[in-house]
Amino acid sequence: MRFVPTAIADVVIVEPDVFGDARGFFLETWQDEKFRAGGIDVAFVQDNHSRSRQGILRGLHYQLTQPQGKLVRVVTGSVFDVAVDLRRASPTFGQWVGVELSEDNHRMLWVPPGFAHGFYVLSAMADFVYKCTAAYAPEDERCIRWDDPDLAIDWPVPAHATPLVSEKDAAGATFGEAEVYP
C-alpha cells in the first residue's frame, strides 16, 4: 500500500496493492496498522455508499462543529474528487486538490477533518463509498458552491454542460461567506 502526498500535505492518495488474475482481484481497503504507518491514525464510526449518474456533482460539503474525516473510493465507474482546505490557520487555506478515483485505478483519497468535499461523476454511473470519522449531523452540515469563483476548481465538466446539483448544493454559500474552521 502506498500513501502518495498531494499539493495539500494532509490530503493523501492511497494506492492499495491489487492482487488480480483471470478470476478477478483482491485488495485491502482498510488495515489499521498500515494506515497508521502511512500517517492516517483515525477511528471510523460510519460507512456510506452513494450512487450517482453521469453529470451529477455532489458538494462541496462539510460539518462545522463535528468535522468528518473521510476515506473515499469508487467501486463502480469514475469520479473527479475534490477536497478544499477550510482551516483558516493552514498555509493552504482556500486551496483544493482534485483526483480521479475509479474502479480501474482503485485509488482512495483521505480527506481529513477541516476540509469541504465534493465529487463530479465522469462515468455513466458511479458507486462511491466512504468511511467517516464522525457521524452525519444534518444540523451541522454546511455547503460551499461548487462553482465559487474564488476557489476556481477546475471541474472536468464538458464545454457547454452544466452539472446536475441538488437544490441544497445550488443554494450553497460562497467561499467568502462560508463558515470555516479556525
Image (spheres, rainbow, N blue to C red):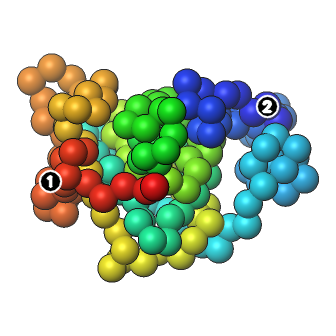
Q: Is residue 12 above or below residue 141?
A: above
Q: Amino acid at mark 1?
A: Ala
Direction from residue 155 to residue 132 in the image, left or right: right
Q: Earlier in the sequence, mark 1 or mark 2?
A: 2
Direction from residue 165 to residue 107 in the image, left or right: right
Image point (26%, 54%), residue name: 178
Residue corresponding to mark 2: 2
Task: Measuring from the top left, give residue 140's x and y in whole percent.
Answer: 37, 74
39 or 1: which is nearer to us? 39
Residue corresponding to mark 1: 170
Q: Quadrant of the N terminus?
A: top right
At mark 2, the secondary structure is: strand
Q: Is residue 52 visible?
A: no
At mark 1, the secondary structure is: helix
Q: Is residue 136 above or below residue 148?
A: below
**Label 2 near label 1: C-beta < 8 Å?**
no
Displayed quadrant of residue 176: top left
